[in-house]
Amino acid sequence: MKISHAIFAGLTLAALAGCGESGAPSIKVGLNTELTGEMPAVGASARNAAELFVSEINAAGGIDVGEQKLPIELIVADNGAKADQARTVAQKLISQDNVLAMIGPDASSCAIPASIVAETLKCPMISPWSTNPKTTLNDDGSPKKYVFRACFIDSFQARVLAKFVLNTLNAKTAAVLYDVASEAPNGQANLFREVFQQNGGKIVAFETYSTGDRDFSAQLTKIKAANPEVIFLPAYYNDAAGITRQARQQGITAQFVGSDAWSSPEIIKLGGNDIAGSYFCNHYSTEIATDVAKKFMSDYKARYGQNPDDVAALTYDAFGLLVQAIRDAGKLDREAVRDALAKIEKYQGVTGEMQFKDGSGDPIKSAVILQIKDNAFNWVQNGQP
Amino acid sequence: MLYYIAQQTINAIQLGSIYALIALGYSMVYGVLVMINFAHSDLFMLGAFACLLLATMLPVQLPFVVILLLVMAIIGLLGALIERVAYRPLRGAPRVSAIITALGCGLVIQNTTLSLSPYPKYMPELFNSRTLTFSGLTITTLQILIIGISFGLMVALDFLIRKTRYGMAMRAISFDVRTVPLMGIPVNRIISLTFLVGAGLGGAAGMLYGLAYPQISSGIGILIGWKAFIAAVIGGIGSIRGAVLGGFLLGLVEVMAVAFTDSSYRDLIAYSLLLLILVFKPYGLLGQAPNQKV
């Protein structure tokens, strides 16, 4: 006990001394992410990309704000992939740590509650990966003022996927299996059904499970009986791997199609042969990368020894958007940064070009279709909405 | 249609056998101590982790049966240890203290595991599973193994309780805990043994679950633990055969709710039906009303 007290006192002194010495202010940015819980691969990618971005900016001396050059101080907080914890973490980052802006959360089930906190406390928030339309919208359908995202939204993704299944795969019947208790999958499933049916497709089974379920056999037996050509699985990577495995065990041979929730490379390891050959919609492809993307990919790989997934790329872009807004604003003021963000006309990010328009927090950008083949994500085509 | 029902029944039996194995642990402890061991679902989770460690960390590849027995022994001993250090000192305390302690033990186990292993782990294939097809019906050899082991363990437990002296002592304690020590029965030892066996079965269930659904994390016990507890209550908590019946019934109701209605209503339908059972049988299907002691 005594020793730990001594260490603690020492650290406190050191910290105080550190403050006294430098005296220079920094720009505090919070990262609210899913480090533990249902999707830790998402949180790990977000943290990696954030740390990479911040170390690059700080190595170059920081960001120009007015006449000063200020470093970024990154504060990472774990939301456990739980809605209530995401809300608490947002509250803590904004009120207690007094961050200038918050990046994250990534899962829509966390980003939606956190966005309400950000909106109420008037703090800019950028979710890298939350695709559910509700993240940036108020209950009455008007756009939230302080909430932005770096990714496309689910209604766009649903159009891309429905057209891909109908036109490229030439399939007219599809089944859907999704987590009814999770925001992003729920939204994606319903929007896909709507667009697929509008364009002449037929949904032969529309089945659900609940977060935490590991046994999907009953739903799959039902889907097998409906005999669809395609099974759409808007499920996070861990669920998707489990579902495809159990489906193949039941002798289901239909083509699997997934949403951007699949994008963690973990899915290749988890799904193995059962998921090989499946298609999904994604934010970017390493194969058609621009120079900006190539640089990011090689830096990321050099630092972490693995290729960045789209959560990493989008987190990097979310930080990029924020930094551009801080530069444009020229001062460390939440209101000014928010106004600058809403006016970004062109940002060349890792995941392509982005633009914010008409007060909406949703960027205008593109999508790609990828296939899991030879233990990698392979580019198939650019998304056609 | 017949094939469809048969296939769904296979699904239900697999799910039900795992619920039943876990439910047994809740029921046995309740039987002797009239206490709900909320740490049981976390012992279940540790069973999966113990199997993972035994299968991947040792220099030699142990046979399947040896791993199963080791997992049961380790988790069983852990269950008995928890009883010794955390529950026994509270034996005379109000019942709610013991329940809160159990919840606390569960949270400690769960969060220790979370801090040691924050990312999900993947269970290696200990068993080369093949899919068998009988005119449209599919079943994997792993499913057959899981169902077989579950039944084997349940039959063995039934034998232990009904035909051995230890079993007789357990039943005696659950009948009247105050008189039994006067007959010279070592109550503490029997209670330890109950925890050993109950937790061992939970550990085996965890291992089988990990093999069937090979992603394991510190949270896998939460949902399934609650469901198994419900199964134990429906069957009549304290009753061994009731726990088995409750487990299979819950598996069957859940699967059939998906099979014949909208799967979004699965939990609503399944648990409404089970509540209805409690309305007519408040002590569960095979449970007995507590003895009135005047």
Image (spheres, rainbow, N blue to C red):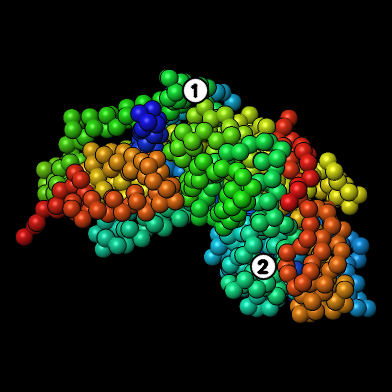
Q: Residues within 10 Å of mark 1 (few under 14, many from 20)?
A: some
Q: Give residue B131's mark.
A: 1
Picture residue at 85% right of the left edge, 43% below the top: A288
Picture residue at 87% right of the left edge, 58% below the top: A348
Tell which residue pokes out farthest to the left in this image: B294
User: Is B144 on the left or on the right of B235, as rendered?
Assistant: right
Q: Position of residue A359 (x, y in %)?
A: 75, 73
**Is residue A380 something one can see in this rendering?**
yes
Amino acid at pointer 2 = Thr
Q: Position of residue A206 (x, y in %)?
A: 50, 45
Quadrant location, the C terminus of chain B: bottom left
Is B34 in front, or is B88? Answer: B34
In the picture of the structure, the residue carrying the numbered disc 2 is: A136
The chain to which mark 2 is attached is A
The total of numbered circles placed on residues is: 2
Picture residue at 29% right of the left edge, 50% below the top: B273
Figure check: B93 above or below A378: below
Q: Residues within 10 Å of mark 2 (few under 14, many from 20)?
A: many
User: Is B293 on the left or on the right of B41, as rendered?
Assistant: left
Figure check: A72 above or below A67: above
User: Is B157 on the left or on the right of B117, as rendered?
Assistant: left
Is B136 in front, or is A288? Answer: B136
Q: Position of residue B285 (x, y in %)?
A: 20, 45
The chain to which mark 1 is attached is B
Figure check: A56 above or below B24: below
Label 2 with label 1: CB-CB less than 8 Å: no
Compute the Cα span from label 2 to label 1.
Answer: 46 Å
Judge if badges 2 and 1 mark residues of a common chain.
Answer: no
Picture residue at 75% right of the left edge, 65% below the top: A74
* Occupied quadrant, residue B169: top left
Quadrant location, the N terminus of chain B: top left
Q: Helix, strand, or loop for circle 2?
A: helix
